[in-house]
Image: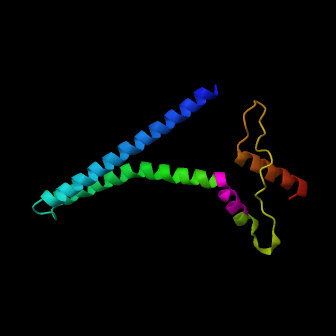
Amino acid sequence: MTEAIEREGSSMKREGMLLNVVCLVMALLFFGLAGLNFFSAGNFISTDSLFFTSVCGMMALLFLLVPLMTLRAARKEKRAAAGELTSAAAARGGALAGGARTLIAPVRYADAVDARGRPIPPDVARMVEVMSEQERTGA
């Protein structure tokens, strides 16, 4: 069973890598077309030439979004694994003026399941914790 999961995970990594490579190649192709238009056009400041260059540039930037978002997600995942995100969120949420209590409660039921055996999402567990705390205080 674990071999199948590992195999599936490695194939997903390969698919993601292939998608990034294809997107980078397409972006380079569109940047190349824009450059070719710039150097081969007799009068670059014409409506057709500027339109073609802007469309090629926009398409190249759109193809570059996929690898950039993949890099951003990987970096965010590394920081989450290191615990930086949770400590930063706790530092932001814990500082309120006037000594007021925060409404963001720590998630105590991270591994809890609902009546059907599904895991409870952290945001739902946090809302349940906040509501139960409000009931206890009578607010």
Queried whether the magenta region covers residue 84, the answer comes back as: yes
Queried whether the magenta region covers residue 139, the answer comes back as: no
Residue 115 is left or right of residue 43, and the answer is right
Name the quadrant of the N terminus: top right
Q: Position of residue 130 (x, y in %)?
A: 80, 53
Residue 24 is left or right of residue 42, and the answer is right
Quadrant of the rendered image containing residue 102: bottom right
Compared with 71, 117 (above or below) is above
Q: Which residues are magenta?
A: 81-90
Farthest-out residue, top: 1
Compared with 51, 125 (above or below) is above
Q: Position of residue 114 (x, y in %)?
A: 77, 35
Name the quadrant of the C terminus: bottom right
User: Which residue corresponds to the image point at 35% horizontal and 54% vertical from the top-left?
Assistant: 61
User: Which residue corresponds to the image point at 70% horizontal and 48% vertical from the top-left?
Assistant: 123
**Numbered disc total:** 0
Q: How is the image coloured?
A: rainbow
Q: Position of residue 76 (x, y in %)?
A: 57, 54
Using the image as rendered, state which of residue 37 and residue 50 is in the foreground. Answer: 37
What's the magenta bit mostly, secondary-structure-wise? Answer: helix
Using the image as rendered, state which of residue 121 and residue 79 is in the foreground. Answer: 79
Farthest-out residue, front: 3
User: Which residue corresponds to the image point at 37% horizontal and 45% vertical from the top-left?
Assistant: 23
Residue 95 is left or right of residue 73, and the answer is right
Using the image as rendered, state which of residue 128 and residue 82 is in the foreground. Answer: 82
Using the image as rendered, state which of residue 2 and residue 16 is in the foreground. Answer: 2
Farthest-out residue, bottom: 98
User: Which residue corresponds to the image point at 70% horizontal and 43% vertical from the top-left?
Assistant: 121
